[in-house]
Amino acid sequence: MNPTDPRTERPDKLEAAEPQILIVDDARDIRESLGQYLRKQGYRTQLAANGIEARRIIEEASLALIVLDVMMPGEDGLSICRWLTGRGGPPVILLTAMADETDRIVGLELGADDYVVKPFNPRELLARIRAVLRRAPMPAPTITGTQRRFAGWEHAPATQELRHADGRHVVLTSGENRLLTVLLDHAQTVLSRDRLLDLTAGRDAKAYDRAIDNTVSRLRRKIEDDPKSPRLIVTEWGGGYMLAAPVETL
């Protein structure tokens, strides 16, 4: 592959503090030229040509923002936006060629933070990206190498892994890893959904009221003996969630 191809640039050459942006567009010239432009402006970028690639990157990467084309073959941008809203972000700016204002309103109602109509000026999109990041920062909990043990599980946050004394091995998504880290930090303490959103994503809880529930459900399926009758991550009705087990730092 061409070493100057933006898809091959190694992210470890860049400063970790630089926000990472995912560009999802089936038009190669748009996503690659936009990726190159944003890198020159100090951002790290990842590129996806369709919904399948986008979902994989979203599960694996720590993203500050997603620039998302609406009209794509296969899964369209509105479907991906709805899925992102359900899991609590990151912020989304829609790229749309649609002239009908109603279609743009639908995207905003699904949880998009802004939209830009094609054809667009990259400088305008950059300004909108900066504005969204200013008003919707996503501070995540500090992920260190400190490992902790609870209920037979050992959590390695740096590698997003869980290992059980009986040999089970679980790999967590970034969202699941952040949530578990927060629950371990506040073991045996009830945390409301709003508080969990603040600690894991920093987004507006009112816009993403199901995000924590969805992540808790996925985490329970990975660590509970019976996810339908959880004993580790318990629900406090009217309150939120609590990690019920004591925690030991290794």
Image (cartoon, grey):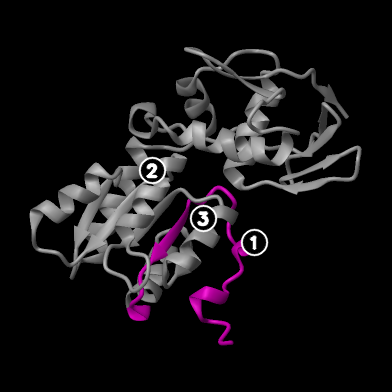
Q: Quadrant of the C terminus?
A: top right
Residue 85: numbered disc: 2
Q: Nearer the viewer, mark 3 or mark 1?
A: 3
Between tags 3 and 2, which lies in front? 2
Highlighted range, magenta: 1-29
The magenta stretch spans residue 107: no
Q: Are marks 3 and 2 in contact (CB under 8 Å)?
A: no
The residue wearing badge 3 is: 58
Q: Residues within 10 Å of mark 3 (few under 14, many from 20)?
A: some
Calculate the distance from the C-alpha at mark 3 to the C-alpha at mark 2: 13 Å
Indicate whether 135 appears above or below 5. Answer: above
- Percent from the top left, x then y, of residue 131? 29, 44
Mark 3 secondary-structure assignment: helix
In this rendered view, identify the residue nearer to me: 131 or 172.
Answer: 172
Q: CA distance from mark 1 to mark 2?
A: 29 Å
Q: Please, what secondary structure does the residue beneath circle 1 have?
A: helix
Q: Which residue occupies the extreme bottom position in the image?
A: 1
The amino acid at mark 1 is Asp
For residue 6: magenta?
A: yes
User: Residue type at mark 3?
Assistant: Ile
Quarter of the image where one finds residue 100: bottom left
Q: Which mark is residue 12?
A: 1
The percent position of residue 229, horizontal first and vertical second, equals 66, 26
| Residue extending furthest toward the right | 166
Q: Earlier in the sequence, mark 3 or mark 1?
A: 1
Q: Is residue 10 left or right of residue 127?
A: right
Return the x and y of residue 156 as percentages of the image width and height. 78, 40
